[in-house]
Amino acid sequence: MANHSLDILFAALGDPTRRAIIERLAHGPAPVKELAAPHDMALPSFLQHIKIMETGGIIATRKEGRQRICWMEPNALIPLQGWLEWQRQAWEAQARKS
Amino acid sequence: MANHSLDILFAALGDPTRRAIIERLAHGPAPVKELAAPHDMALPSFLQHIKIMETGGIIATRKEGRQRICWMEPNALIPLQGWLEWQRQAWEAQARKS
DNA sequence: ATGTTAGTTAGACCCATGGCTAACCATTCG
DNA sequence: CGAATGGTTAGCCATGGGTCTAACTAACAT
């Protein structure tokens, strides 16, 4: 079961900066500047993370004046929950047999 | 919230070979040879994946004769489910406000 | 004792990732 | 207009991840 979208999603969440962005956006949209503020990192480096999550479908963005507003794509993480749940159930089914 | 263990867990699941190993082990323990069989890959490369998951606490292993048996560490993935669920709830709480 | 099986260790290689600076646009403010 | 703000693009660099081959060890089979 080589699922390319799981590759991208799991890899995206493997970085603490990106998880922090998600944690922030879960509470509502924000411009790049505000998202970047807590991360001691040059803006271009930070923007890279934004782009990774946008192309991965985890967040979406729109240009508004000179700002770029970012927000969660709330269903993006469902495949991950699905996969994890699947594993858990497979495990429990086999554990019950022994 | 820089959680190092989430780093390791998410990164581990970002690789399709490693997810496949988990999917297999969810159905019960197996020796390295059997795990490696479906993966067109040299044994040392494959062993690397095993080691990553073992040090990440996702699987455990024991030497048995000349084989090494691997099995799931069934609670390892709980932090991931926890984090995902947390995000989902944060999102829903803020969505309700608008 | 010899050969075969199943891992293991060591070393090398390549490319993707994550970070930087410098220079450049586009929008808004005074 | 001119300066400041918020992003963006381009190019560089170091590190790490995933792969390989070659050579070695430990256990089992004959």
Image: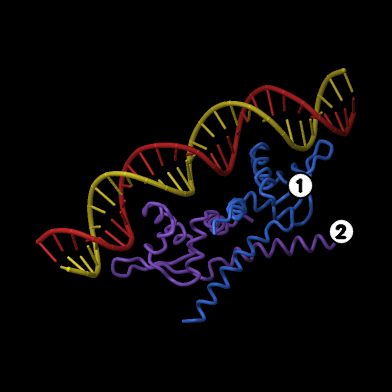
Chain colours: A blue, B purple, C red, D yellow
Quadrant position of residue A48: top right
Residue located at (29% from left, 69% from top): B65
Q: Residue A70 shows which numbered tag?
A: 1
- Where residue B78 appears, as percent x and y from the top left, is 58, 68
Residue situated in front as seen by the camera: D29 or D4 = D29
Query: In the figure, is residue A89 to the left or right of B92?
Result: left
Q: Amino acid at mark 2?
A: Ser
- Judge whether A48 appears above or below B84 on screen: above
Residue situated in front as seen by the camera: A23 or A48 = A48
Query: In the figure, is residue B71 to the left or right of A68?
Result: left
Q: Residues within 10 Å of mark 1 (few under 14, many from 20)?
A: many
- Where residue B73 appears, as percent x and y from the top left, is 49, 69
Residue located at (70% from left, 61% from top): B87
> Are circles 1 and 2 on residues that touch, CB within 8 Å?
no
Quadrant position of residue A74: bottom right
Query: In the figure, is residue C18 to the left or right of B38?
Result: right
Q: Chain of mark 2?
A: B
- Judge whether A2 appears above or below D6 on screen: below
- Where residue B76 appears, as percent x and y from the top left, is 53, 67
Residue situated in front as seen by the camera: B43 or B2 = B43
Quickly name the residue at label 2. Answer: B98
Q: Chain of mark 1?
A: A
Residue located at (62% from left, 65% from top): B81
Q: Amino acid at mark 1?
A: Cys
Under circle 1, the secondary element is strand
Under circle 2, the secondary element is loop
- Where residue A25 appears, as percent x and y from the top left, is 74, 53
Query: In the figure, is residue A34 to the left or right of D10?
Result: right
